[in-house]
Amino acid sequence: MSDATVNDAAKTTESTTSEPLGETYLDKFPAEAKVVRSALYSSFLALALGGLFGVIQTLHRTDFLRIMESETYYTVLTAHGVFLVIAFTIFFLVGVFTWAVTTSLDREVEDIRFTWAWLGTMTAGAAMAAAAILAGFTDSLDMSADVLFTFYAPMQAHPLFYLGLTVFVVGTWMAGADWFRSWFAWKKENPGERIPLPTFMVLTTMIMWYVATLGVATAILAFLLPWSLGLIDSVNPTLTRTLFWFFGHPVVYFWLMPAYMMWYVLLPKLSGGKLFSDPLARVVFVLFLLLSTPVGIHHQYLDPGISEGFKFIAMTNTMFLLLPSLLTAFTVVASMEHGARQRGGTGRIGWLKALPWRDPVFAGMALAGLMFAAGGFSGMINAGMNINYLVHNTLWVPGHFHLTVGTAVALTFMAASYWFIPQLTGKKLWNRPVALVQVVLWFVGMTFMANAMHRAGLLGMPRRTAEPQYDGFEYEAGVGSVAELDAQIALGGIILTLSLVLFFAVIIGTVLGSRSDEVPANGYADTLSGPEDSPKILDNLKLWFGLAVVLVIIAYTFPLLSIIERGGLFGPDITAFPQSIDIVSMAWLTVEQYATDTFTSATEVAQATIDGVLR
Amino acid sequence: MSSATEQNQADQGAGGPQLDHPVREIGHDEYDPIGTLTLIMLYFLLLAFLWVFMYFVEFLGNDPTVIGWIGTGVGMA
Amino acid sequence: MRISTEGLLIVLAFTVVLVVELRTVLAWFNLELTVFESLMFSVALIVAIVVWALFPQDGSRDTDASGSS
Ligand code: HEM
Ligand SMILES: [Cu+2]
């Protein structure tokens, strides 16, 4: 990158009078832009709340600052998990998907009222679930949902929580229907044409989502909700867990695929090049559709009651998932390199300098992708059955997924926001340097936090606890000390929070700004090798849907049958937590029991003494 | 409306200003992603190194688990 | 300046990754740095990079910057 000249050029470009740059999304689709904007604002609200809880729990568990009782920790952790990985990610992606479908089919949604209806449904569901979670902070309401985002039985939430999640998911189903409807209408007018790549990505992702959500829908509607309403007495925890993870792994791809979409359709353009290969991109999305559901059991390597054989099959399927991941790495990097070389980059490594690092949208996504490569390694560790035993349920696992969903996805979304918000508001991004500092800070903060989390996990420090250290037990620290790891985690958490503050400053600054005609035109990257080079069969969505279902049936029928056979549909009469009996009377019972026991043993001693004396 | 990439637009809001004029146009056939190959090889080397590292963490740092000393696995003991 | 401010920022971000990971890697070779030592090392490294970046490129504005790094 050649410095001084470039800097001068920057100044002159910025000061030249701006010529119109073409149509923004707002110009072209004003009604849709409003919907997408609302979806993004909802997601930002979730991000703000989730981030706040994130730093609270970080400082709590590392014992630097405790503003709550440890008993409240699960309320905070549930809010952090649900707000970030359910609300933030999904609200954002429905916005992006709406943008992708309308832009690439070049048509408005079929009925904007329906579009608002699904967004409204999702919002109502999210609000219900959020109310149930946040109610856990006050004792004045007999309501809580401290069940974490996995809601494993026997932890039990207020029915409102399960209902809210259901309504939310129904909203996403409606959204998918909306996009399919657009596609059907488009297909009628454009018979025989290839599905435009962004729409193709949306549709394959949504098919995966429909298949996957059947798992949670069953878990919630057939078991957890009736159980929390008191209609049934008990559930089979292994069964509801398995149904959860039936959904839980594909949901990972539900977060990732929109991020991939940004990398495939925006990043090459920002780098000044073209997408390397449209066919490869299609293959990747089809592979994710096929492979992401029949692997869920890899989250249950340590669950008793599922035989090793099923776990082994899940592991094998998981390893196949490496293929589309590596294809993505190749395609995305090759597209960036194409851009860099068109911009004059040279050399084997030197071309990296020709990339537009000063652009926060590009830099954010590129850094996110880089962290994802690191997350890929810890993911491979998680995926291996025997090595997983070493890190299961330790802090290693949050370390891993803060690199994936917490950075690859979250940072890509934040960077993408710097592109989308101007598109959706017609306003110029407020302060690009601050935006650049923001994405870099996220990268640095996550380096500190994730590195220490991984290392702490290797020492066996558990996740999901307010008190990782307690009397009478010491971790055998490998490199460094536990205190030092804690400090590093807290430092990372604080830098991340700072980064979030800057993010909101830039977004709010942009939204409050005035309309500008310097916003770039809406659009996405061209391809070096286009859809004409890809086999037609790739666009046969019915075929892929059918295959995905078959694979799921093969992977899940026997595990589910054997779980039900072993534990029954409703399980071995488990006791829900929290119990409805209140704590005070419980405590009283315990004291009473204790007293009786002492008394009994005292009489026994006395009796024995008397016996001895009398003898 | 899949906009072409001959960008002069991406920069103002997004891309760097130096993007104004792509220095050259590289088509499908002239493009040789040698840099990508380099990076991917580096990544594979790193992965291989980390796998070895993992072996030490898992099997030597702690007591052997699951399969025992590697020698037994390869018939050396 | 040898590289742009933005470029410097990115390079520094990568430096953080390097120093954070280096400590673990070095420990593997029985070279255990204390937090203080690795902190000093990183400060020195960062100062060196900043000085390198800010140092004027012998006056000339020759655009062939690919010799650096
Ligand atoms: C300010 C930034 C963040 C900080 C400081 C932070 C911190 C943490 C910490 C320390 C934990 C582990 C708590 C424990 O297991 O005891 C955690 C868990 C988690 N984080 Fe974050 N995080 C941040 C951002 C994010 C983002 C952006 C996402 C996803 C988009 C995310 C998703 C999660 C999830 C899913 C969990 C697991 C919750 C559970 O175990 O139920 N975090 N976070
Ligand atoms: Cu998974």
Image: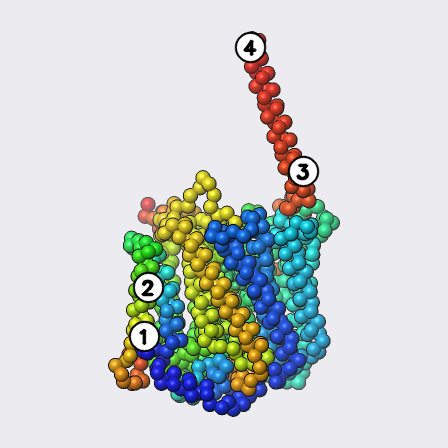
Which residue is depicted at the point 47% across and 87% down? Answer: B8
Identify the amino acid type marked 2.
Answer: Val
Please determine whether, in this image, residue A558 is positioned above or below residue A440: above
Observer-nearest of A377 and C55: C55
Q: Are marks 3 and 4 in contact (CB under 8 Å)?
A: no
> Residue under circle 3?
A585
Could you confirm whether marks 2 and 3 are on the same chain?
no
Nearer to us of marks 4 and 2 is: 2
Q: What element carries label 3?
A: helix
Residue C53's tag is: 1
Nearer to us of marks 3 and 4 is: 3
Gap between marks 2 and 3, in whole Å? 58 Å
Please determine whether, in this image, residue A493 is positioned above or below residue A180: above
Identify the amino acid type marked 4.
Answer: Val
Say whether residue A424 is visible: yes
Q: Do the residues labelled 3 and 1 touch (CB within 8 Å)?
A: no
Q: Are marks 4 and 1 in contact (CB under 8 Å)?
A: no
Identify the amino acid type marked 1.
Answer: Ala
Residue A7 x, y percent position in the rendering: 38, 83
Dividing the picture into quadrants, the one containing residue A110 is bottom right
